[in-house]
Amino acid sequence: MVHRLRWKLFAFMLLVSFVPMLLVGVLGYTAQKEELQAQAEETLVHQNERLTDELARHLEERFQDAEYLAQNPVIRDPLTLEAQYKSELSRFLDVHPMYRDVFVINTNGIIIADIHSRLRSQDVRDRPWFDDVLEGEGSISSVYRSPLLQEPVMVMAVPVFDNSGSFKRILLPAFDMEQFHEEMTAFMEMDDNAWEASSFLLNEDGDIITHRDPDQILDENFLQESGVTQQQLEASSENGTIVHREDGQVLAFSRIPSFSGFDQTWYVGVEAGESAFSEPLSNLLRQYLVLFGIVLIALFAAVLWLSRRLEHPVAQLVDKAGIVERGGTYEKEFRGSYREIDDLNRAFDAMAEKLSAREQFHRRSTLVLESTDNGVFAFERESGRITLWNRRCREMFQQQAPRTIGDLAQRSSAFADIKPYLTFTREPLSRELQLEEDGVQRHFLISMAPLEQTGEDEWLVLFFDLTDKRRVEREMIRSERLKVVAQMAAGFAHEVRNPLTTIRGFIQLAHQNNAPISREYYELVIGEIDRVNKIIKELLKTADPDPEVEEGKVDLHQVVRDVVTLQESQLRAHQVSWRVQLDDSDAFVWADKNKLKQVLVNLVQNSMEAMTDGGTMTITTLTAENGSVITIQDTGIGMDEKTIERLGTPFFTNKETGTGLGLTMSYRLIQEMNGSVDVDSAPGQGTTFTIYLPHYRETG
């Protein structure tokens, strides 16, 4: 029975797998054969077109090289000596190795200089290109056999004019034909998808003018030797068609387009063997054969494996069921079976695993519930029967195993207090309550939600102990309040110190001069006293739920002038020079004038203190599209990136006597006025504070 099943399985898999794949392979190979043939021909045509474009570009660039050489001052000078000619021509040949030589010819057709050929004084007036160049136009010649060199040559004839524009001589670079063909071959090799093919050039008569075999140049007519007609040549070059020869060669032709200096009728030919075209088909066939072989091997291995899996007795499954029933573990490896027995074995294993997993999960859940410090219990809504009661609930309510909610409420006064809060809603419900435990009031968060997965109207109640959390929160609130008080006190002392220092300076100045305070300084002193009063009011505002807002239209330039006037004496005392550069246009901003002055005084004093050995302070204002910009730049010691990142942090300062609250308060004041502050600094390069404030806009 087993063997018969094995062979039937093998035949069936062979029928449903191998035969369809064989049929698909044959049909696919037939369908792709013509497509690959067309793609191969298209690739050869495209390869020929790219080669033609590259060759045309190459000829045009070489012609431009010759024209550029004709502009050389040494070549153009009629008094240039032969040695000077040779020096320039040698340099040209070193740069352009595709030329075999360069000739200089006078207007009578006599060679007056060359490098390698030693043809000086030879007459070349009978060359086909000579008459054209005498008319002042350069050209690329056809390939012809040179009587002097006794080999095929191709030259570029370019007229040379002196500085007055008179035609003086002819410049004649001659191509190295072998090098020229090597460059054609290199152009083809640049294409990664190109066929392995050979290239050649034909003139309008079909003569070979460039070929990998130099003996064929101008000695063979391709049309006569290959059997390709003139009509086939022109049709292939115009329509991009393929020409098939009887000897199994495939050809594609295209004509080199004309350009300035080139009007020859030349055809680029690319020739490849049909064997290269059939190579993709051969590769495809080999791939199919390899695939079929792999499939056969895989099928055979699969049949053997499946047969072993099906060869085991039913008694093995019966033994397995008996062992599991007794609570044991089946140690032997179950090799599987066939049909219903195999399905039954998998179902049995799944059932046993689920039972084991459920038992393990139940044990872990019980362990977690008993270990947690949160109270957890569950009950049925209709009967009130308690289905879950963990260790923490036993401690909280002093009940070991209550049966129902009603019994628990009668035996525990603590639970009786919270029972009215157990409301039944579909959404999870949470509320915070205080319960007495061991004579101590503790805070609990009670959460209640239905257990929909059980299929019964069962509810879960959790008690989260929040006592320690609430105590920590109270400590944090107290700490924050103390911190705020300390910051306010330090900030008040810091901010009041600045105007008092200014007032003291003016009074000392008046005392030293034995004269009363001038009216200008008197008004500034009064303003500083008002600012002290303003700072005191700001401190008191922290307790005012609706502080007074004094923002409005402020003349930024006037505030800057006032601040500079206030700080003049201290700037001189610190040997600091200052420059004020105000924008030409008006700068009215929406701000609190006193707060803005307070910020600027802080920044000026910080910059002044940063210049311990004196320096220069520059205050600049600019008017932007939506606001005004103030920059305060000093030449002080500067700051590193770490210090810049901590600017504005309360109590952070680099000064021995500073409180670290000046910049903190300044940043906050600018933010209250909807502005911003940027800092740019580097050690030893000074610091620049940039303040942006919005424009004042009329309302109503």
Image (cartoon, rainbow, N blue to C red):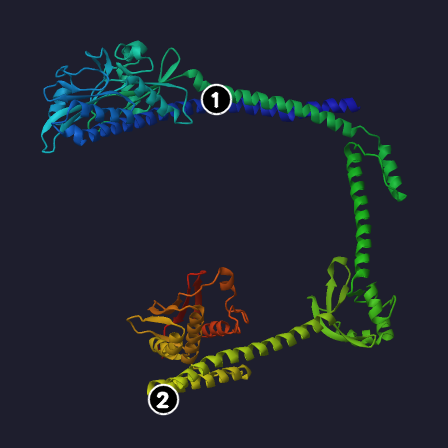
Q: Nearer the viewer, residue 441 or 34?
A: 441
Q: Residue 473's quadrant in the figure?
A: bottom right
Q: Which residue bears the numbered disc 1?
A: 280
Q: Is residue 412 left or right of residue 165?
A: right
Q: Secondary structure at mark 1?
A: helix
Residue 208 x %, y %: 28, 14
Is the residue marked by circle 1 packed among few (<14), some (14-19), or many (20+) residues within 10 Å?
Answer: some
Q: Given the image, on which type of amino acid does mark 2 rest?
A: Asn
Quarter where residue 565 is shown: bottom left
Quadrant of image for the C terminus: bottom left
Residue 66 in the image: above or below residue 396: above
Spatial distance from mark 2 to mark 1, Cα to Cα?
Answer: 111 Å
The N terminus lies in quadrant = top right
Please state which of the two labelled residues, at mark 2 or mark 1, is closer to the viewer.
2
Tell me where residue 140 appears, x and y as whole percent. Answer: 21, 23
In the rendered structure, which amino acid carries the disc numbered 1?
Pro
Q: Quadrant of residue 121?
A: top left
- Residue at 15 percent across and 21 percent down: it is 105
First of labels 2, 1 by sequence position:
1
Give the residue at mark 2.
514
